[in-house]
Image (cartoon, rainbow, N blue to C red):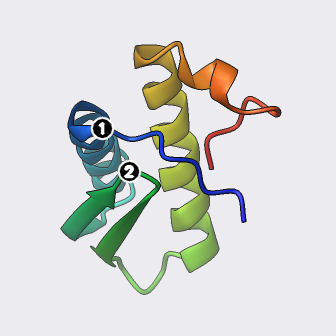
Amino acid sequence: KYRRKLFDSQMIAQLREAFGSAAAKLECEIIEMDGEPDHVHLLVAYPPKLAVSVMVNNLKSVSSRLLRQQNAHLRMQSKTGLLW
């Protein structure tokens, strides 16, 4: 419904880096990541003590913030200014 073709190969590489650093802080491991122009897929190994909702919220917020900082035009692409 809300998918916009925003991601190019450079942005997907930036997302990979952002997800990796956020996951490391949560003691998670990004096993696999793939990106398309309008979405990304992650396969994540996470400790059982960590709630899935906490992990997802953290990965989304960190990656969104970093990607919008590095790509100012993304702020203009969304009515709400949000990426995810």
Q: Quadrant of residue 32?
A: bottom left
Residue on which disc 2 sits: 37
| Mark 2 residue type | Pro
Q: Is residue 25 left or right of residue 73?
A: left
| Mark 1 residue type | Asp
Q: Quadrant of residue 83?
A: top right
Q: Earlier in the sequence, mark 1 or mark 2?
A: 1
Are the residues at dot 1 and dot 2 in contact (C-beta closer than 8 Å)?
yes
Q: Secondary structure at mark 2?
A: loop
Residue on which disc 1 sits: 8
Q: Is residue 53 left or right of residue 12?
A: right
**Could you say where residue 28 lies in the image, as x and y percent from the top left?**
30, 66
Residue sitting at x 50%, y 75%: 50
Q: Nearer the viewer, residue 4 or 42?
A: 4
Residue sitting at x 73%, y 29%: 81
As drawn, the label of residue 77 is: none
